Image: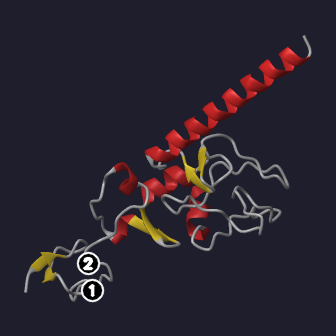
Amino acid sequence: MPLNPCIDCGALISTEAQSCPKCKSSSPRGWTCGVCRWNGDQRPFSTKNGIWIGSFSYHLSCAERMLTPSKTLLCGGCSRNLTNLWGVWRDHVESLSLHCDECGHNTGFVNSEHGQARHCHTCGLPLMVWHDLAWSQGYTHHRVCAPSWVIEDEKHQAALKEESARRNDSLWKRLFS
């Protein structure tokens, strides 16, 4: 039976083992980051350096980069500055309860029509109001992790709208000139 090292402690374990007998890691082969995998990085990482959110695992640094506002974010309820709350949010992001601790207002999720937080179709992380988003075929993605076909489809849709607007302008000019 082949043996591989546990990603958390280095002990040699069976490739069929579900946990490490030495360190008790429940993921001895590691996790793959939901953000990095779309950039071609499939290398597993230790569970000690990650966070599990919903159905995906992430490097702490990737989750922090994606979930921390890139600009000043004020609560829509009480105007409290929420920009530097990653430490607090990290503790609550799994339950998706990112509400202002002062007034209880939703602090940044892009919500669906049912009031639930929406998630990136590519990486699975929540979509936040400060993210640069890409839309295609009814799916929403973070622009940084969206597959290239999404960006191409978005460009194509923009070109079609531009062409339609140009034709409408031309038609109006012919009708009213």
* Quadrant of residue 35 within the rendered picture: bottom left
Mark 1 residue element = loop
Question: Between 27 and 80, which is closer to the camera in this rendering?
Answer: 27
Distance from disc 1 to disc 2, alpha carbons, whole Å, reads 6 Å
Location of the C terminus (image quadrant): top right
Q: Position of 132 compared to 149: left or right? A: right
172 w.r.t. 15: above or below: above
Q: Which residue is mark 1?
A: 19
Q: Which residue is mark 2?
A: 28
43 w.r.t. 48: above or below: above
Question: Between 58 and 38, which is closer to the camera in this rendering?
Answer: 38
Give the residue displayed 53% in from the left and 52% down from the top: 66
Type of residue at label 1? Ser
Type of residue at label 2? Pro
Residue at the extreme left: 1
68 w.r.t. 112: above or below: above
Question: Between 124 and 14, which is closer to the camera in this rendering?
Answer: 124
In the rendering, at what x and y percent does residue 44 appear? 28, 64
